[in-house]
Image (tube, helix red, strand yellow):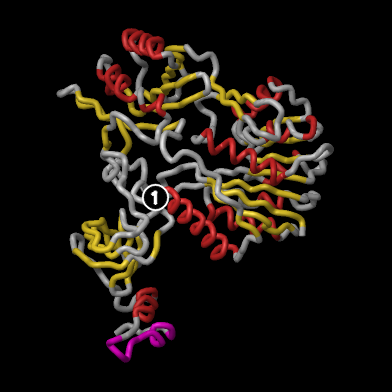
């Protein structure tokens, strides 16, 4: 018989009627692990929501994640995946519904993987996201913000200006599936309209499907990306081989007919513009604190926020929190094409010096063009790998009293230490991942900065994804 560790001996039951807490502790050290056969039906009380929007309950001490379930509901669920520490189940029946449950507006919501929270009313979605941020900051960094500001929100439908759709073509029946992948599967759910897309993009779905089917080599199209700019829509086709002249002409005519730009992207090849009714992709930022709108050009490769309305509010709040004044020296990290850098440079009669750093050189060049086109002489874009210590050389001989960073989902680990020695008074941190943000905020606290404000930004309504903004000030 295998010997038990001291912790296992401590947790070993003397009483068969042990508490659920003891059973959970036992499971952590390998004692009496509950197994659930796939297909088993179980009754659950859902205690809360997971970070990805699934209902969470317990069955004989084991954590169960239920797709489509909501906090406070009594449900019957079917197990479809069992693991050592948890199991996953799908909702079968709701015996007691949450007061926040609503009927999804999308006819394919139950199968499409594009949205996950349409069954939760929009106000409750915000509360769920704020609770997720609070929990991550507290659990991972022991941070309790001094102030929570009202969330930045926009329209819950018709907001998305960028989306990628999957395709699959069946040559024998000349059938094309164009849509989002099913939640948890590779299957494609075909759609003829999408309520979260900007209406102009949604209206393109049917005619785009029809023109792709009419091509000689539809099977070469692997993905379709839709993008809405100020001047109109753009369709980006990802293809596995060079399209024939006939297919190129067919698509070019389609672009002209619908007044859109159409781009073809092939692996290891340059883009080929098939139709150019839009001379350049751009979006404008109109912020109250800035006298005139700022126009930012971008390419199909560049990152832009998917929600134009919420992005306006996010930029405005960042300016308010950073409070740029004449003479300030501001560092903008992960600057992209200048979503924050240009508005900052426009403040205080353009007497704010801004150094914008970005790891993608094509966006650096685009940012420089945007600075020049908008007349910002004190704004400089530089190329830098911000995950490498060598990036410090770009600012170590300069003095910055304010900074803003908007890193990718992985966060900005180590950035705070690279900024050590800078006389930072204020730092605005924008993130799409509260977990990595919590880790990084803890590093900034070691520089003598503390979290003064935090706010949720609902950039992706109907999904668990979010943006969050934090203000750190010198203590």
Q: How packed is label 1: few (under 14 Cα within 10 Å), some, or many (20 or more)?
A: some
Which part of the image, by quadrant, shows the N terminus?
Answer: bottom left
- Secondary structure beneath label 1: loop
Q: Nearer the viewer, residue 53 or 12?
A: 53
- Which residue is at 37% across, 62% downward? 71
The residue at the point 81 percent across, 32 percent down is 351
Asked if residue 463 is positioned above or below residue 44 in the image, the reply reads above
Could you say where residue 343 lies in the image, as x and y percent from the top left?
68, 33
Locate residue 30: give its quadrant. Answer: bottom left
Compared to residue 370, the image places residue 455 above or below, namely below
Give the residues drawn in magenta, as a range: 6-17
The answer to whether residue 94 is left or right of residue 9 is: left
* Quadrant assignment for the C terminus: bottom right
Q: Which image quadrant is residue 32 in?
A: bottom left
Residue 277: x, y in percent?
A: 47, 12
State the residue lying farthest toward the right: 327
Q: Position of residue 377 (x, y in %)?
A: 77, 25
Asked whether, in this view, residue 44 is left or right of residue 307, the answer is: left
Q: Nearer the viewer, residue 339 or 167?
A: 339
The residue located at (31%, 45%) in the rendering is 104
Residue placed under numbered mark 1 in the picture: 121
């Amino acid at each position: 018989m295998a010997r038990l560790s001291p912790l296992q001996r401590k947790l070993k039951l003397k009483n068969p009627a042990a508490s659920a807490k003891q059973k959970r502790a036992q499971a952590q050290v390998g004692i009496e692990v509950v197994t659930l056969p796939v297909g088993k039906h179980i009754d659950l009380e859902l205690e809360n929501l997971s970070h990805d929007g699934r209902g969470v309950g317990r069955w004989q001490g084991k954590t169960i994640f239920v797709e489509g379930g909501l906090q406070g509901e009594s449900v019957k669920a079917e197990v479809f995946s069992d693991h050592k520490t948890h199991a996953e189940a799908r909702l079968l029946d709701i015996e007691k519904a949450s007061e926040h449950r609503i009927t999804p507006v999308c006819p394919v919501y139950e199968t499409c993987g594009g949205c996950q929270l349409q069954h939760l009313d929009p106000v409750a979605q915000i509360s769920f996201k704020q609770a997720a941020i609070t929990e991550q900051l507290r659990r991972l960094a022991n941070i309790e913000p001094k102030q929570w500001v009202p969330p930045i929100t926009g329209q819950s439908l018709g907001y998305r200006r960028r989306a990628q759709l999957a395709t699959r073509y069946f040559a024998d029946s000349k059938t094309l599936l164009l849509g989002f992948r099913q939640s948890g599967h590779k299957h494609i759910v075909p759609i003829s309209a999408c309520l979260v897309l900007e209406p102009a993009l949604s209206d393109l779905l049917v005619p785009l499907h029809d023109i792709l089917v009419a091509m000689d080599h539809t099977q070469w199209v692997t993905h379709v990306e839709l993008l809405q700019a100020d001047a109109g829509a753009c369709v980006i086709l990802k293809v596995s081989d060079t399209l024939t002249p006939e297919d190129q002409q067919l698509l070019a005519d389609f672009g002209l007919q619908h007044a859109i730009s159409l781009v073809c992207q092939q692996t290891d090849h340059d883009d080929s513009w098939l139709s150019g009714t839009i001379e350049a992709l751009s979006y404008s930022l109109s912020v109250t604190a800035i006298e005139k709108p700022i126009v930012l050009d971008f390419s199909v490769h560049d990152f832009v926020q998917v929600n134009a309305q919420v992005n306006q509010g996010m930029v405005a709040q960042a300016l308010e929190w950073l409070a740029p004044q004449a003479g300030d020296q501001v560092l903008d990290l992960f600057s992209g094409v200048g979503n924050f850098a240009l508005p900052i440079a426009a403040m205080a009669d353009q007497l704010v010096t801004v150094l914008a750093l970005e790891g993608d050189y094509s966006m650096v060049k685009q940012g420089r063009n945007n600075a020049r086109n908008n007349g910002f002489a004190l704004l400089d874009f530089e190329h830098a790998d911000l995950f490498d210590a060598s990036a410090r050389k770009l600012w170590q001989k300069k003095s910055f009293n304010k900074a803003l960073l908007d890193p990718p989902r992985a966060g900005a680990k180590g950035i705070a230490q690279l900024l050590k020695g800078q006389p930072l008074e204020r730092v605005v941190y924008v993130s799409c991942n509260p977990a990595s943000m919590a880790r990084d905020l803890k590093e900034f606290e070691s520089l003598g900065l503390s979290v003064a404000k935090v706010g949720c930004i609902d950039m992706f309504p109907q999904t668990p994804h979010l943006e969050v903004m934090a203000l750190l000030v010198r203590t």
